[in-house]
Structure formats: structure tokens, C-alpha cells
Amino acid sequence: MLTRERITEEAHRLGFVDIGFTTADPFDSHLEYLEKNREAYEWAPKLGLDLFKGADPRTVMPEAKSIIVLIEAYYRESFPPSLEAHFGRCYLDDDRVTRDGLTVRMKAFRSFLKENGVASKAPFDIPHRMAAARAGTGTFGKNCLLYSNRAVRGSSWILPLAFLVDREFSPDAPTIGIDCPSWCRNACISACPTRALTGDGTIDPRRCISYLSYFGDGITPVELREPMGMYVYGCDRCQNVCPRNTAWSAQELPPNPRVAAKAKDFDLAALLHMDRTYFEQRIWPHMFYMSADDLWRWKMNVARVMGNSGDDRYLPELLRAFGETDDTRVRGMIAWALGKIGGVEARAALQRLCPAEDGPVRTEFVMALG
């Protein structure tokens, strides 16, 4: 008979930093929250992430009797500063396309269960963070992220991985709740420039920089462009300022060689000018939420970042990109970026290009010219 102790040993052997067990009962409070805020989450099912269905694990796996939650620490090695400045850390070593890192260990864990007579599923639809808290592996922060109870010095640099299994195991004591220190003065809420964090332990995902960078519709609203700052894809603002993360973030970590090797591929200028082949071979395997049909979104995000940099060395790249595309969302953001950088050269370019434009792109030029 496979025991909890044997499963725990195998999880640690495979490199997971913690493990917890909970029942396969429905997440009723989670579903109630989703229903109450349905408008804010209607985008998820359209992208194949059925959060509403996943609130009841047995709709995903009818024979499920327990949930095993593994905790993966994704920030055990340092990343190049050039990448951390523009991309969320959790995306920098994501192997859900290449399947040559974490996926290998997840498969090994499921194979171990199967060899011991336990069937399992690892769906993305169920609430992994809530499952992890119910399994006693973590608590929540006011930024809605999960913080480890026993690993990575209590920080949030973790990914909870939930496995539905057809074997019943005794559950751990839940640790659901916000456990931020009383002396913290809402650092994450104050640091969120788009005001996605509501202050009551919930979030409006549609205002989150991560969501806006890869799921937002159309050209980024003017009022959000500057607050989104220097992030092209993802965001770590609320984690970087969190005092619960200080102990882990302050240490010197060895470099991640896998990420360092691909850093040059994510150069801002290269992203701004990339074609479909470049994207599919070098970018998509690592950051896959946007398909090749969404190249415009990548380029729009990069143009915004260049504008927010205020660095006039990007002017030639922006002007070249303007001539490379007919996409009004990219051209409009380039016009905004030129205006944001400012200066004689940028203004001259805006005045030169404006007369030939119409519609929303011309509107952007007019705004950029003040």
C-alpha cells in the first residue's frame, strides 16, 4: 500500500520543495467568488481555462478522492537583469512547450503513482493556489499570491501543482487565509501601478499588468501605458516589494544557465523587429500565451516599454518598426512612444509622419504632438 510518507519521499527526491494532501471536495467558496465576479473572469473559459468547471475537481476526474499538491520553487537561480527588468520571473524558465524541465519531473511523479496503482490527472482548470492552501502548504498575501509555509523562506516564488488521484489519503490541516505581517503597510497594494489589487485580498485580473501584457484587447488604454512601466510580458512588482519575500530575494543565487543562454533572443530591438520564424523558434517555446498571430501585441508592448524608458537611442528602432508594419495598434503605440521620449528628433519625426495618417493612428500622433 502506497503511503503518504513514501509519496513525500519521492516528491522531495524529484526536487519539489514541499508537498501537501487534501480532499477532492468542491471548492465551494472559490466558485462562489467566481460567480460573484463572473464579469472579471469571463475571458478565462474563452482561452480554454474553465475555472468555473474546475472548482469541482470531480467534474475533471469523477473518480478523484484526494488532491496531492507539490510545490515547485521557480526562483532558485538568478536570472539576467536584462530579462528581470522586462519579464516576470515565473515565465523565464517555463517549459510547458519545450517539456524539458519541470514537465519531466511532473511526469516522473505521475509515473511513480501509476506504478504503485494510483491513477492521476494534473489539470490546469482546478484552483491550484486554493488547493495548496487547503493542503496546508501555504497562505495567501494581499497580492493574492500563495506564500510557502515551509519552503523558500516563506516566499511567494513558488508554483503549486495539483494532482487529482483516485486514492484517498488523510488530508493535511488547511492554512487558508491571508498571513501578511501586521506591520506591513500594504506594500503590494501601494506598488501596483494599475490598481489591480483591490485591497481586500482580491484582484481585478483585467487590470493586472500580466493580463494586460498578453491578453488585453486592442491597443493598451492611454491611462495604463505609463503605469505598466518596463514590463513586456508578465510583472513582479507586488512580489518585489513584499517584505515576506525579502529573506529569499536578498540572498546571492547561482545563475540559471538555461535562461542566460537565451537572454540575447529577448533583446528589445530584436523583439520589435522579429518575424514569424524568429518568434516561433526563439520566443514562443518559452512564452507561449501569445501565438504567432499576436506578434502585434509583442511589438506594441515593446514600443510601450521603449517609450517609458525615455531613452532616445530607441528612436531609430521605433521609426524603422513604424515602416515595417501596417498594424494600427503597433503604429499607434510607436507614435505614443515617440511622444513619450520627446526631444527635437522625435518631434520632427512625428510632424513628418502625421500628415499621412488617419483614424486612430492619427489620433495617437496628435496626442503625441501635444
Image (cartoon, rainbow, N blue to C red):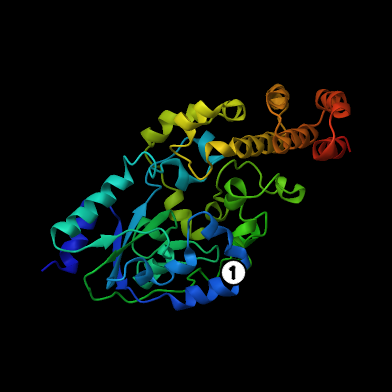
Q: Residue at x 24, y 69 (%)?
A: 166
Which residue position is annotated with label 1? 38
Q: Residues within 10 Å of mark 1 (few under 14, many from 20)?
A: few
Q: Is residue 117 left or right of residue 360?
A: left
Residue 60: give x, y in percent of width and height.
36, 66
On the question of residue 149 being in view, the answer is yes
Closer-to-camera residue (235/164): 164
Closer-to-camera residue (326/238): 326
Instruction: Relative to 130, say whether 232 is above or below.
Output: above
Circle 1 — which element? helix
Instruction: Relative to 317, say whether 204 is above or below.
Output: below
Residue 16: give x, y in percent of width and height.
29, 54
Q: Residue at x 67, y 59 (%)?
A: 195
Q: Is residue 116 left or right of residue 356?
A: left
Residue 255: give x, y in percent of width and height.
39, 36
Instruction: Relative to 353, say whether 56 is above or below.
Output: below
Location of residue 324 by image quarter: top right
Closer-to-camera residue (343/38): 38
Location of residue 113 by image quarter: bottom left
Residue type indicated by callout 1:
Arg
- Name the image quarter holding the N terminus: bottom left
Residue 192: give x, y in percent of width and height.
63, 56
